[in-house]
Image: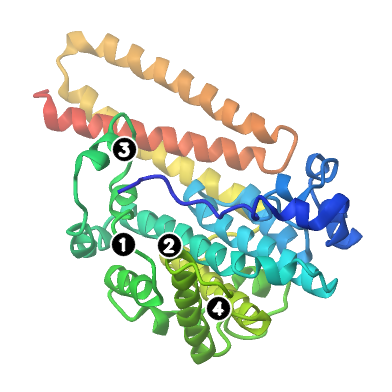
Amino acid sequence: MHLAAPRVPDFPAALPQRLGGGGVKSVLPSGVMAGLDPAIHSSAKLGQINPSRDIFMSAQSERLASLLKTHRSKRRRDRLRPISQIISLRTAFESLEENKSLVLREILGYFPISLVTALEVFFRHTVAELIDAGSPYVERSEAIAKSIKFDLEMIRALAGRNLSLGEVIAQAPAFQSLGSVCGTMDQLTGSKFLTLLLPVRNRWEVEVFKSDDGPVIKDIDFVTRNLTRLYEVRHILVHEMPRETPCDLDDIRGFFEATDQFITAAYWFVSELLEPNAPLLQQPMNAAASRAAQAKDEELARLCADIRQSLPEHRHPSFDTANAAWKTFRIAEAEFQGSEYEGGTAAPFAKARSFEDSTKRRIAFWKEFIEDIDV
């Protein structure tokens, strides 16, 4: 069992030869090319770029890029990245189709394989995040964890790596069918996952862009039918190596739309489950992060006061010195984390989150100290 998450595959290596000297510019319109990263644009050969990684900037992907930069947690950013990959793939597909590229039919099978991979990456991150959030998800994950086999390969993969319980258990599900995805999520949520997704709305569209047009999933039968077919096509492509691609352009359009609705609804459902009504814009996010950091600091202060009172008096000076040194480190670490966004509105958020995370680790340290040391 491998712990490394699968990556959406690159376009077939032989594709540049099929495109001729024009490379990607010959099949993608100038508007799409203009949105590519300059480093990619300067060497625009389709064999040298990964459209699952380099977002073809559209209005939707710009919104997503903003979320990726400013969202509350690394875990949530991990869940957003497969969504950005799907946007990239869909934009590439639609551009090729619009330009009536002869290449499109030759690479048609690439899209189902990549979509299933993006779904797998998304749900592994989601499972890990839910389990690491604690109760009741840890308890509900017991049945999932039973399928983990700690063979030599698994032990080697774990050796020397700092992995959470959720990250380990998230490797267990196969995620090779819609049934396996929903079954795992049913187990963790304690209810029928598809039913839970039906009323979900995209908060970004509702609260920021004021363009709500109802629930994310418009037709659950359409979504389940196309996703079931998507997994079937991917299985045929990967395991049977057919002479002809077992899907057509209409199938691919359906796969993209169903995947988009399903993964978007899942993202917002889990986000609200873990952090209800979390702020979406930078200034409210900064304020919320500051409040959370202050609350943890107050919790730590109370804990340290209790520990100090319990220690013999001759240990007080070293206790105070250790805490003062740690506080200096905490501030320096927060400044370092904030320097990535120096001069920007996200800098206070990054500093506050670092401050809070450091404080959480210190609280855990002192709680373990209380348990292990007879003070």
**Going from the N terminus, do you reach mark 3 or mark 2 first?**
2
Q: For the point 88% across and 63% down, which residue is it? A: 29
Closer-to-camera residue (319/3): 3
The quadrant in which residue 193 appears is bottom left
Q: CA distance from mark 1 to mark 4?
A: 26 Å
**Going from the N terminus, do you reach mark 2 or mark 1 first?**
2
Residue that carries the numbered disc 3 in the rendered image: 157
Residue that carries the numbered disc 1 in the rendered image: 173
- Which kind of residue does numbered mark 3 sit on? Ala
- Residue 206 horizontal side relative to residue 137, left or right: right
Mark 4 in CB contact with mark 2 (< 8 angstroms): no
- Which kind of residue does numbered mark 4 sit on? Pro
The quadrant in which residue 367 appears is top left
Mark 1 in CB contact with mark 4 (< 8 angstroms): no
Mark 2 neighbour density, 10 Å: few (under 14) some (14–19) many (20 or more): many
Residue that carries the numbered disc 4 in the rendered image: 246
- Residue 369 horizontal side relative to residue 81, left or right: left
- Which kind of residue does numbered mark 1 sit on? Pro
Mark 1 neighbour density, 10 Å: few (under 14) some (14–19) many (20 or more): some
**Going from the N terminus, do you reach mark 4 or mark 2 first?**
2
Helix, strand or loop for disc 2:
helix
Helix, strand or loop for disc 4:
loop
Q: Mark number for residue 298?
A: none
Above or below, comparing residue 219 to residue 17 in the picture? below
Residue 250 in sight in this render: yes
Residue that carries the numbered disc 2 in the rendered image: 123
Q: CA distance from mark 1 to mark 3?
A: 17 Å
Q: CA distance from mark 3 to mark 4?
A: 36 Å
Query: In front of the other: label 1 or label 4?
Result: 4
Query: In front of the other: label 2 or label 1?
Result: 1
Q: CA distance from mark 2 to mark 1?
A: 10 Å
**Going from the N terminus, do you reach mark 1 or mark 4 first?**
1
